Image (cartoon, helix red, strand yellow):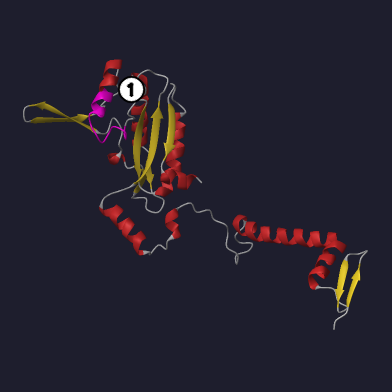
Amino acid sequence: MSETTRKGGQGSERLGGREPKNIAFSGFGVERPRLVVGVTVLLTLLIAAAAVVPTLAPKALPFLPPIRVDTDPENMLRPDEAVRVFHHEMKRILSLHDIVVVGVVNEDDADGVFNPGSLTRVYELTRFAETLRWPSRDDPDRMEGVVPQDIIAPSTVDNIEQAGPGTVRFEWLMPEPPRTREEALAVRDKAARIPFLEGTLLAEDGKAVALYLPITSKDVSYEIYKRLREKIATFDGSERYFITGLPVAEDTF
C-alpha cells in the first residue's frame, strides 16, 4: 500500500513519496514566475513575427505564407467549382455585371430630391460616372470600370407614353436637368407611372433616387467609389449621398 503524507502548513500532498505532476508543474510556475512569463512573452513574439514578417517582408521568410484579407465570398469555393463556373458563364451569356449603387437623398426640400438643384447634380453625377473607364492593366485593349450603356439613372432610362391612338412614344425620362419646379415634378410623376422604377429608381415618397452603375469587375469598385466621392465633394446643396453595393463592401475592406 502506498504511503500518504499530508503537510498541513504547505497544503501539499505526497502520494507514494512523489508529488502529483499537476502540482509539480504549478509549483514550478509559482517558484519561477519571471522565467515562465519571459518564455510566454518570447513564444508570443515569435508567433506574432511568424505572422507579420511574411506579410511585410515576403522575401525574409519565403517558406511562411503571408496574411491576406479576402472578403470575396466566391473564394470560399475553388475556381473550378461547378457552381462557380456556371455562375460566371451565365453572367457572361446574359451580360450581367456587379453593380455599384449611389443613393441621393434630400429630406430638406418639400419636393425631396425632385427639385431643379438636386436633379441637376444627379444628372451631372451620372454623366461623370459614364467617364469612369480606363485601359485594363492586363490587357490595354480592353476597357474596365463602369459599363456606361447599362447605367440606370433618371437620364438613362426610357419614359414610355401613349402619343395617340395606336402610337407609343419613347423618350428619355430626364434628357436634361429641369429648370423649374414644374419640370422637376414632371420627372417624378413620369417615373412613378412606370412600375419597375417606383421603389427602385425613386423612393415612393420622392425623397431619394438611386443610380445603378454596372462595373466590369469587382476589382475596380474601390477606385470607382473613391472617384465618386471626390466628385460628390465638389457639390453644394443639402443632398446626402450613399455609395453601396456588394462589390464596394468586398473591395473596400
Amino acid, disc 1: Phe
Q: Give the residues in magenta.
A: 187-201
Residue furthest to the bottom in view is 1
| Res 79 seen here | yes
Instruction: Specify the quadrant of the image occupied by residue 51.
Output: bottom right
> Is residue 180 at least partly visible in the picture?
no
Quarter-wise, where is residue 190 in the image? top left
Residue lying at 78% horizontally and 62% vertically, measured from the top left: 39
198 part of magenta stretch: yes
Residue 129 percent coordinates (x, y): 36, 35
Decide which of 121, 161 is in the foreground and name it.
161
Judged left or right of residue 48, residue 6 is: right
How far from the left and from the top, in percent, is residue 115?
Answer: 34, 20
Q: Residue furthest front?
A: 1
How dense is the environment of label 1, judged by Cα within 10 Å: few (below 14), some, or many (20 and up)?
many
For residue 135, above or below residue 193: below
Q: Is residue 231 above or below residue 72?
A: above
Residue named by callout 1: 114
Q: Position of residue 135 (x, y in %)?
A: 37, 46
Of all residues, the one furthest to the right in this rendering is: 9
Between 225 and 195, the one nearer to me in the picture:
195
Q: Is residue 20 above or below residue 115?
A: below
Which residue is located at x 33 percent, y 28 percent? 123
Secondary structure under the numbered disc 1 in the rendered image: loop
Find the residue positioned furthest to the left.
165
* Magenta region includes residue 165: no
Q: Position of residue 198 (x, y in %)?
A: 29, 32
Question: On the image, which quarter does residue 83 sit in?
Answer: bottom left
Residue located at (40% from left, 27% from top): 105
Give the main secondary structure of the magenta stretch.
loop
- Residue sitting at 34 percent across and 24 percent down? 119
Q: Quadrant of the N terminus?
A: bottom right
